[in-house]
Image: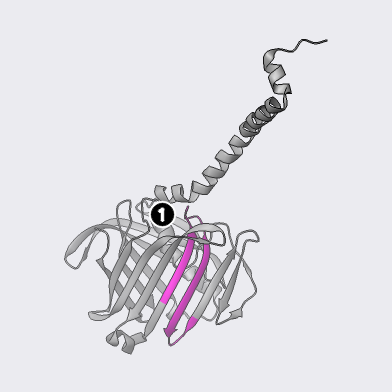
Amino acid sequence: MIPINKKEALLLKPEGIHRGLIKYVILALFPIIFLNYLLLNAGDKAADRNAAFQPGEKLTYKGKWGIIPTGELTLEVLPIDTVNGVQAYHFVMITKTNDEGDRIYKIRERQDSYVDTGVTHSIFYKKKTESEHPRDESINFDWIKLEAVYTNFAETRPPIRIMPGTFDPLALFYAIRSQNLKENSEIYIPLTDGKHNIEIRIMVGKRDVTEIAGKMYNTLEITPYMEMLDKQDKEVRKSERAQLKIWVTDDEKKIPIKIRSKVGIISFDFDLVSGPS
């Protein structure tokens, strides 16, 4: 007969077996529990690492056409939300022309963009526009199938293939701010409007000083190369190609202090009037 010590005897008793089993189950489950804790908090930690922007940021811009005031634009980061089971930044852009702007090109528009907290890709996008060309659009991103589905006024198009790391049009602002911007360099960001999937070439210009309402800012000039998108859309005439320039602060926040949007002969400048100092 093989001798049994007191410890082994205790484990062979019903209560000993129970305590021993609990001990080994806890040891086996601990790595899994710890991994789940890391995954559940990954979104919050990713958000904490983003030095460029955080929920609560609101930027207000006054629009003008030449010297004529034309309206207002706001960019806002709303609280972290959960979309399709993923924690996401919620970005909002609201554009509204005033009476003078209405005479040039009336617009009332809201865009909502949901982007993962690591700022690596879009999750959902929607836009509602009241203008000469009204829109009620949405883009659903399916990252398992690598597809995006575009809907406008309840009419859904067939899905299109998208590249890994693709962003929606509004998220482009924040994707740029999340980059390590270097003077006289280029970066590439995949973008979709739900109908086309392209890679936008972003030109980062020289450091400069930009004056807004009597205040001087150290800035970098950012130019997204939009002609790549135009080539995908045969309906866009050369005279109607969209042009966009953004001047951002030359610091870790990279706050857009001036946005210039031009389509054809219509050009609007939006200058920052309130936001983080």
Quadrant of residue 152 within the rendered picture = bottom right
Residue 52 visible to an observer of this rendering: yes
Compared to residue 88, the image places residue 127 above or below, namely: below
**Residue beneath the point at 34% across and 79% down:** 96
Check disc 1: other Cα within 10 Å, few if <14, some if 14-19, many if 20+.
some
Q: Quadrant of the N terminus?
A: top right
Quadrant of residue 52 within the rendered picture = bottom left
Q: Residue furthest right?
A: 1
The picture places residue 215, in percent across and down from the top left corner, at 18, 63
**Residue beneath the point at 52% across and 48% down:** 40
Q: Which residue is mark 1?
A: 178
SS at mark 1 in the image? loop
**Residue beneath the point at 42% across and 65% down:** 91
* Left or right: 210, with 234 as reference point: left
**Amino acid at dot 1:** Ser
How many marks overall? 1
The picture places residue 15, in percent across and down from the top left corner, at 68, 27
Please name the predominant secondary structure of the magenta segment in the image.
strand
The picture places residue 165, in percent across and down from the top left corner, at 54, 57
Quadrant of residue 240 within the rendered picture = bottom left
Residue 264 visible to an observer of this rendering: no
* Left or right: 169, with 147 as reference point: left
Tell which of 262 and 153 is nearer to you.
Answer: 153
The segment highlighted magenta reads 110-135
Magenta-colored stretch includes residue 132: yes
Magenta-colored stretch includes residue 161: no
